[in-house]
Image (cartoon, rainbow, N blue to C red):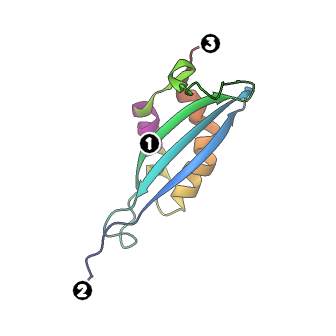
Amino acid sequence: FFLVQHPPITFTLKRSMEDCNDDDWVAHVLLQVTFPADYPLHTVPPKIDIVWFILTQKSMVVPSNKPLDSSNLGILDELGLLQAISEQAQELLGMPSVFELVDTWLSEHLFDYITRKDN
């Protein structure tokens, strides 16, 4: 049979997650999800990239004339997180992996890959 060439399915997801160990900390992440060109014919995990990340505190007060600089609060281990997401995605083949990865797994594990400056 013949398949029509089309651009890959791509979308972004923004998630804000509180640290389960200290609810004053909130991580905000923007992810880009790209499915392979032959999706859904082949069960292959989507490619997930981190487009943007910022770590904030609920109690933080920032004057309106000062920029918010998250790098002073914490650093995200992007490579470690993306590797863990990739490994988890391989286990979820055939399941609704984007929802499972981004909604459930990421909310439980994101702060494992953040080094806060107060540590």
The amino acid on which the numbered mark 1 sits, given as a three-letter code, is Ile
Q: Secondary structure at mark 2?
A: loop
Q: Tell me the residue at 56%/49% (across/down).
A: 14
Task: List the single residue furthest toward the front.
Answer: 65
Q: Which residue is mark 1?
A: 50
Q: Secondary structure at mark 1?
A: strand
Residue that mark 2 sits on: 2
User: Which of 84/27 is in front?
Assistant: 27
Residue drawn at the location 57% of the way across and 35% of the way down: 110
Which quadrant of the structure image shows residue 33? bottom left
Most foreground residue, 105 or 29: 29
In reply to whether residue 84 is colored magenta, the answer given is yes
Upstream in the sequence, badge 3 or badge 1? Answer: 1
The one of 46 and 61 positioned closer to us in this rendering: 61
Q: From which residue to which does the magenta span run?
A: 79-85
Residue plotted at (47% across, 43% down): 85
Which mark is in front, 2 or 3?
A: 3
In magenta segment, residue 82? yes
Amino acid tagged 3: Asp
Q: Nearer the viewer, mark 1 or mark 2?
A: 1
Locate the C terminus and report the quarter of the image it occupies. top right
**Amino acid found under the numbered disc labelled 2:** Phe
Residue 118 bears which disc, if any? 3
Q: Position of residue 96 (x, y in %)?
A: 54, 62
